[in-house]
Image (cartoon, rainbow, N blue to C red):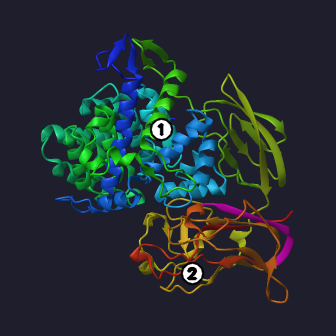
Amino acid sequence: MKRFITILAAAALILTSCGEKKVISRAELRDRIAGAWLGQMVGNIYGLEYENDFIEEPGEGPFVFDKAIHKMTEVDGAFSDDDTDVEYLYLMMMEKYGVEPTYEQIREGWMYHIRDRVWLANRATLGLMHYGLTPPFTGDQRFSPHWFQIDPQLINEIWGYTAPGMPEYAAGISDWAARITSDSWATSPTVVYGAMYSEAFFESDIETLVKHAQSYLPKDDRFYTIINECLDFYHNNPDDWKTARKYIADKYYVNEPDETKTIWNADLNGAMGILALLYGNGDIDKTLLIGCALGFDADNQTATICGLLGVIKGAAAVPTDRSMPFDHWTKPFNDRYINVTRYDMPDASIEDLIDRTTELATKVILARGGKRFVKKGEEWYRINTKAKFHAPLEFCVGPNPRIVAGEPVDYDFACVTNRNYDWKLSGGILPEGLSFDNGRLTGTTEEVGIFEIILTLSDGKKEISKKFQLTVRGRNLAPEAEEILSLAKNTNFEVLDSCWTTVSHSFYAGNVDVIRDGVLDGPGSSFYSLEEKSIAPRQDYFGYRWAEPVTTNMVSFHYGCLEEFGGWYSNMHVEALGTDGEWHEVQTDVTPALPESDAVFIQPHFAEFVFRFQPVTTTAIRVIGDDAILVHWNKYTKNVPSFISITELQVYEAK
């Protein structure tokens, strides 16, 4: 995890101070949290009107918000969207499990409540959760082609405004939460916004907030540089946000490397939020309008920045013409938050959401060294400004180690959040030739079979153990095959380019030959069996033919990166070529279980499915099944044929 640096100075503006402590009344705390919720709702609901509208050029206005008015009329209140509903989910998880839930508990909440209406990194995360992974592996760039997208900064503000006056703690837990969906520099905007939300309870100057939050990033971090660029433009011409926007858009969109070039890039959109904050000069409505005009994924950054201004100024500063646009409403958004997006998540009174969040904030304060006291009959809290976040002790679950007889192994059970804890092998016997050292499995073995081990993890205070199963596979026979069997040999890029794709072209491989090159993920790894435009159902297959019979008992199929409109099987099984020249289905056990449905929201990118069966001697074997057929909502993706995305197919020798 990133190392966060405390930079709070004694001269920082605060409500009330006591040495290095900050104090806040419960009433003030509630008002600022109310500002956070109401500001986010304003930014989200009105920003939706211009989501993804302005890409090549900024918006000019005048801005009208018919969509917002229409939707609020339908529900007679505020309505849920991914800018606020995941935070509502996290609120429920904090109430259920404590203010620092584990990744496993977060996974449970996602899988139960989130069943549709997620995209990009959030959708990739949900698919990997259904595949069996826990964060941070669900955001790892090895397994998610969307690791760099905007998603974390729009769903994690709650970690900042439940940690008032504790910016180092807020930066740490925001980074931890961002890794549920994202990796590397894509978590940095979330860290910055989390720290700003925390410090905004006691600091009102926008530029000071930005600079202080920036210091929680390493100086060589990309978003650190971007913040400097935004500040330089603002200083040189505080009235010309368009020139700043052009520079940022040219550098981080137009000229962004192909692998991370999208209109939803985390740094690109994070920068648009910083620009809107600076040029909005602390005015919520002005900031909202500039945020819309800056474009790209406008509603996400307008939700974040308007919520931040709500913390700074309190609930009364949220414009009532935005929060109460109808005469019959007497409270902001009619005190109604209506869930239209998440499964089994109740509608809520906004006042109740604010009260519940305030209670959680007091628990965070007390859990991290703060104190409660009463002054003149009013409840106050003394805050430990030096509080730090320590990730909960847990085993994070990634893909199973891939161990092949005769091939070197280098597999790390540790991840970014538990790497520095103490690991040990406490039970079971490793295959001969392998060794375990502080989380890492290394060596080479010829001992084929299944081996159970127990690992123990300790933070010096608490110790936990977990069973893991190691499977050592026989030799991979795919490189020795004389022919690759497949329905499509080359990807039709003309058809693909006519679609509304969200995965970078750098991931695509044009020829089926890549399915035995040993590359399981990353750029150039994914073959799409995409041919002509047609919605006719079809079966797709991938396999090998050998010159002489081989004996195998295991096949592994590796999906590539998936599009929102397809790339996976509706069903799949293994067939072997018999001596009669006919294909015969092989009865198999598959690990993990195949997805329960064709729904896009549970399909995992770069997932391996291992088929085990009794030894079969054959000259050819293949994986075959029906391609999933999806009717996609985007007009550019209609009438696209079903297809499969694959990176690798491996066939293992039986011993």
State the residue position of label 2: 489
**Magenta stretch contains residue 615:** yes
Residue at mark 1 to residue at mark 2: CA–CA distance? 42 Å
Please name the residue shown 45% across and 44% down the image: 349
Secondary structure predominantly adopted by residues drawn in magenta: strand
Please name the residue shown 50% across and 65% down the image: 524
- Dot 2 crowding, Cα within 10 Å, few <14, some 14–19, many 20+: some
Q: Earlier in the sequence, mark 1 or mark 2?
A: 1
In-front residue for pair 168/155: 155
**Magenta stretch contains residue 564:** no
In-front residue for pair 609/304: 304
Q: Amino acid at mark 1?
A: Asp
Rendered location of residue 561, percent (x, y) = 54, 64
Rendered location of residue 101, percent (x, y) = 59, 37
State the residue position of label 1: 175
Left or right side of 433 for 199: left
The residue tagged with tag 1: helix, strand or loop? Answer: helix
Left or right side of 201 for 633: right
**Residue 387 sits above or below residue 601 on the image:** above
The picture quadrant where one finds residue 436 is top right
Q: Are marks 1 and 2 in contact (CB under 8 Å)?
A: no
The part of the chain drawn in magenta is 606-618
Rendered location of residue 355, percent (x, y) = 46, 34
Please name the residue shown 27% across and 51% down the image: 327
Residue that sits furthest to the front in the current view: 328
Left or right side of 305 for 159: right
In-front residue for pair 100/645: 100
Q: Amino acid at mark 2?
A: Lys
The picture quadrant where one finds residue 153 is top left
